[in-house]
Each structure stands twice: as structure tokens, then as C-alpha cells.
Amino acid sequence: MKKLLIASTALVGVAFMATSAHAALKMDLGGYFDGYGVYADNHPAAGTNLAKYEFTKDSEMHVNGETTLDNGLTVGAHYQMYVADTAANGTAITANTKASLLASTSNQFPQNAVNGTIVDEAYIYGSGGWGRVNFGEEDGAAYLLQVAAPSADSNVDGLRTYVQDLDTTAWNANLAGLVLDYQQADFRQTDRLTYLTPKFNGFQAGVSYAPYPGTSMVGSSVSGPQTNSIAGAFKDPWDVAARWDGAYQGVAMSVGAGYSYASDQSTTGLAAGAVGTDALKTYNFGANVAMQGFSLGGAYKHSNNGMTSTVNGNSNTAIYDIGAGYDNGPYHAGLSYFHEKFGAGLLGVGAGKDATVHRYALGGGYTFGPGMTFRGAVDWGSYEPTGAAHTNFQQVTLGTDIQF
């Protein structure tokens, strides 16, 4: 999901609340298309044959309607829709699995979700000198204010990964669908209320709340009221986050942090270490500096994954990402290092045996037109369970990112 507004406009006269608050409604249409050729070598076990060459894409269409009233209040509605996208969407899930919570690009912690087959986001907003309010299916404050590290290609090794062709199931059954990124997007596709303050000297804060995860519609033909005692599910998810962006003597700086929490609905019948046996607690912090085209930064994210420890160990994940970049006119070059540690309680392996993923990425891009870039990256790394054989992987991506 990418935040961009667009190019084609139409004006329609509307009235809002009173005749003294007439305004013109502007409709914008836009979106993006990411298309890549991918080479990936997962070094599978003997007897397992995996494709090494594939084409992959991610594309969305965005519609935004907005008007500013005579009293200065800006009101709008925003929709994002998948276009020929293969990501799973629209499945009703009544309990979480360890695999689902790690597959963060589809919908991390997605229980109770009842969603349209192509809708990624749908929300209304209001803004003014007092700040901004979002209501509907949109990311929470912890993600919206999160600071990302520089990257080789933001679609490959950025905050939210869109291009990845790794066989994570072979690493561990509980890592099926694992995406190597560090977005703080617990309950990503959820109807929530978010407030963001205006910026004061570069400082901005935000808070989000939802009664339950997901996008169920109460009292409609889609679904009835939520069940509030599902074992392995959560309730009352909220985020709080803050960020500062500024500059001093030609050096640009960004610093931010966020925290998310959700209560467990019920632990009845759950074994130790199952999803939902504990309240979900996730936090992140990050920082960046940039000067004369060069940038350097890092980010950290930690989560207990809503799971208690087991006899094997804790069920936490801890991620840090360090990146550097250089931008000169239409040219970009970058590199990054990604590190994620999985507690043994999450993996279900022998006592005290955690596991780690390392990934290195190197790449660059060229902007050949407004919103249009060629991109290429090489990334490599390994999955390293303690006391067991490592699994190496390599990936090469070459493609284009078009935003309109």
C-alpha cells in the first residue's frame, strides 16, 4: 500500500450541512504498478525442485474524493483496490496461526476479518489546523509514523516488502509465508479510528483504536455482532506513536517510535505458546540522518506475538534493519542489512534453540520519468537454526515501479 495522490481531476458541486459551507469536490484517480523479473535460488533439499525464474507484480488503483469547506475543514474519502493481485484477501478467519502472524504483507493477525475481494483500504478522513482523523480500514498510527531505514529497493528490502521469492516453509513449518520486513502493522486491515496531531516544529504524534480486529460490519447483511470470547483471538487493539523530522546545518534527521497493544479474548483450551495466550505487545523505533545526498539509518521492531513462552523458550521476534543510500538527481544506490531472531517457543523446536535470518541487499534505481523508476537489486542471506544446518538463499530482482 503506497500513499500517493494523483493526476486526473473532476469538479462536482456539493453541499455539506449548510448552504454557507459550499465547496467543490475534487476526485483523484491514481495507483501504482510494480513489475519484476526475479531469479531466486533457495537451495532446496535433495529431491525438491523449485522454480528459479519468475515474473511477479503488485498493483493497485486508488480513488480519492476531497473537498475543503468554507470553515477550513477538509473532508475526504479514500479507497485502494488490488488490481490482478494474487495476495489473499477476503477470507473470514476466526483464530490466528503462527504462520498467519508472520505473513505481514497480506494481513498480520487477521482474525474476524470479512473483507471485499479486492479492497485494500477504505476510509474517510477530516483534517484542519487541529490535525487529522481517519475512520475506516487504514493502517494505524504505529505504521503511519514509523521511520524506515534507507534501502537498496524499497519494494525488496524496505519497511513493507512487496517482492520476495523465498521458500520459508522449508526453514520451519511455522514460518510459512514469512515476509522479511519490519512494518509495525498488527491487524493491518481493520476498521479503526486514528488521530494524528498537526506538526509542531517537526514533531507529530498519533493514536489509533479499534474495538475488534478486522472489517466486520455490525448489523448488516455481511455479518452480525462480533463474538468476543474466541480462544486465540484479540480485542481492543490500539496504537500510539510519535515522530520528529527536522534539519540542522544541512543535516536532515528523522526519529520515531511506536507501540501497539491488544488484549486476548480468551485463553480457554489453548496450550502454552499458542497465539492468543497473552496480550499482543509490539514496539518499534528508528532514526535516519541525511546530508548532501547520503543517508544512513536504522530501525528496530520487537513483538511477543501475543504468545506465552513454552518449555522451549520465548515466542518473541526481534528485528533490526540498517541501511545506507545515495541519491543524485535521477540516480539512487543503496544497501541494507536485515536481522530477525525467532524465539524457540515460536518455532516449536528443541529447548533453548532460537533461529535467526540474515539478509544483505545491494541495489539501485534510475528515475526515467515522473513517478517512473527502473530498479535492480541483489540480496542474499541465510536461515540459521541453532545447532542445525544453515539454509542459504540468493535473489536477484530487476523491474520497474510506476506510480500515477
Image (cartoon, rainbow, N blue to C red):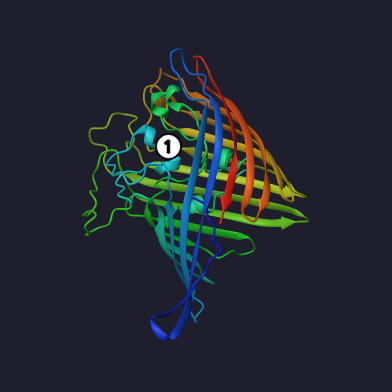
Q: Nearer the viewer, residue 229 or 108?
A: 108
Q: Amino acid at mark 1?
A: Ala
Q: Quadrant of residue 299?
A: top right
Residue bearing the label numbered 1: 103
**In x, y percent, where is residue 121?**
42, 55
Q: Quadrant of residue 352?
A: top left
Q: Residues within 10 Å of mark 1 (few under 14, many from 20)?
A: some
Q: Eyeballing the image, is 235 above or below 385?
A: below
Residue 11 visible in the current orientation: yes
Q: Eyeballing the image, is 21 above or below 8?
A: below
**In x, y percent, where is residue 257?**
55, 49
Q: Nearer the viewer, residue 194 or 58?
A: 58
**In x, y percent, where is residue 356?**
52, 25
- Taking the image as shown, residue 247 lies to the left or right of residue 341, namely right
**In x, y percent, where is residue 309?**
38, 29
Q: Secondary structure at mark 1?
A: loop
Residue furthest bottom as drawn: 20
Q: Which residue is found at the position 66% from the left and 47% from the top? A: 288
Q: Which residue is found at the position 51% from the left and 43% from the top? A: 183
